[in-house]
Image (cartoon, rainbow, N blue to C red):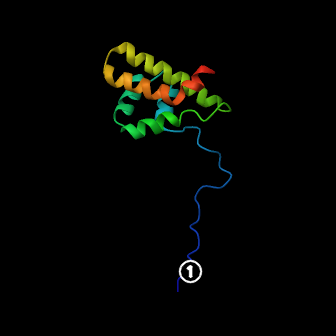
Amino acid sequence: EMPWPPPPAASTTPPSAPPSPVRSRLASLLAARPPHHDATTAHVSALGLSAIDAAFRGLYEGNHNAAGASLLIDACAWLTHLLRSKRGHDAAVAYVHQFLAVHAHALAGI
């Protein structure tokens, strides 16, 4: 007989494992050296509106987050590149709008 409730499943990740340094696909694309602006644009353009919002929000977690601040600067470089390229201007403006709606306060402090 199966005991009830069933025993918890064994975790394959030890509890002391450090968190992954990469937050998301967007974060890894923004942090790449040299920058992969075209790949970043392709990735973001394939996302839905709520996924774009979530990806932007996941870049920075507060003043204690130096890696996140660096990602915000990388995102600004990508958005600048996108606007200067004059490709997909309407989408670029929408990305800038959403990015600033989420991170304007943090950017003012960087």
Q: For mark 1, does the 10 Å Cα neighbourhood hold few (<14), some (14 to 19), or many (20 or more) residues? A: few
Q: Quadrant for residue 52, please give it.
A: top left
Q: Position of residue 78 (x, y in %)?
A: 45, 21
Question: Position of 65 compared to 1: left or right?
Answer: right
Question: Position of 23 compared to 43: left or right?
Answer: right
Q: Position of residue 55 (x, y in %)?
A: 47, 36
Q: On screen, 48 above or below 77?
A: below
- Which residue lies at the image location 43% right of the left edge and 23% below the top edge? 96
- For the C terminus, the quadrant is top right
Q: Position of residue 95 (x, y in %)?
A: 41, 26
Q: On screen, 47 above or below 40?
A: below
- Which residue sits furthest bottom? 1
- Which residue sits furthest top? 84
Q: Quadrant for residue 90, please give it.
A: top left
Question: Disc count in the image?
Answer: 1
Is residue 25 something that shows in the picture? no
- Closest to the observer, 33 or 81: 81
Q: Position of residue 15 (x, y in %)?
A: 66, 55
What's the amino acid at mark 1? Trp
Is residue 86 something that shows in the picture? yes
Secondary element at image label 1: loop
- Which residue lies at the image location 50% right of the left edge and 33% below the top edge? 28
- Which residue lies at the image location 34% right of the left edge and 35% below the top edge? 46
Q: Quadrant for residue 84, please give it.
A: top left
- Closest to the observer, 3 or 88: 88
Q: Which residue is mark 1?
A: 4
- Which residue lies at the image location 53% right of the left edge and 37% below the top edge? 58
